[in-house]
Amino acid sequence: MSFRRYLIQRITAVLMAPLIVAHLALILWTSGQGLTAADILSRTRGSLGWGLFYGGFVALAAVHGAIGVRGVAREWSGLRDAALDALMWGFGAVLLGLGLRAVWAVIA
């Protein structure tokens, strides 16, 4: 793994850690309050804050996951540099697109 990809993956992991903790805490709190999915969605509609929180989370996860998939594909397949990079960028784009679509569904 190149040092740059290594560093980017570690940085995204560090940045995601507090977001993951906040996300899990939110799940525990809302389920403890007895809120339904409809209740939660009614509170997130039109919220720029939640959009930024989860949009950032999705972007970090897409970068982190794409780099990870590249590493796994390098170990498990015969793919080499150019093909691995194409796989990484494509996988990252798909993750980002699906994740942002989900964020949009929660806030719009």
Image (cartoon, helix red, strand yellow):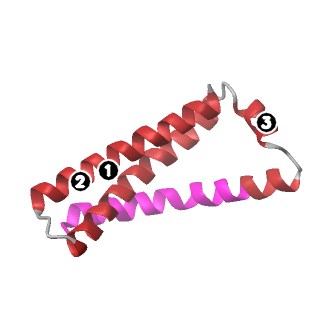
The x and y percentages for residue 84 are: 18, 59
Residue 55 horizontal side relative to residue 46, left or right: left
Residue type of the residue flagged with mark 2: Leu
Residue type of the residue flagged with mark 3: Ala
| Main secondary structure along the magenta-highlighted residues | helix
Q: Tell me the CA gap for discs 3 and 1.
A: 31 Å
Give the residues in magenta.
1-25
**In the image, residue 35 lies in the stretch drawn in magenta:** no
In the image as oriented, which residue stretches furthest toward the front? 77
Rendered position, 98 above or below 17: above
In the rendered image, which residue does mark 3 sit on? 38
Q: How many marks?
A: 3
Q: Callout 3: few (<14), some (14-19), or many (20+) C-alpha neighbours within 10 Å? A: few
In the rendered image, which residue does mark 2 sit on? 87
In the rendered image, which residue does mark 1 sit on? 91
Q: Callout 1: few (<14), some (14-19), or many (20+) C-alpha neighbours within 10 Å? A: some
**In which quadrant of the rendered image does the C terminus lie?**
top right
Please report the residue visible at 40 percent of the width from the left and 50 percent of the height from the top: 62
Closest to the observer, 59 or 87: 87
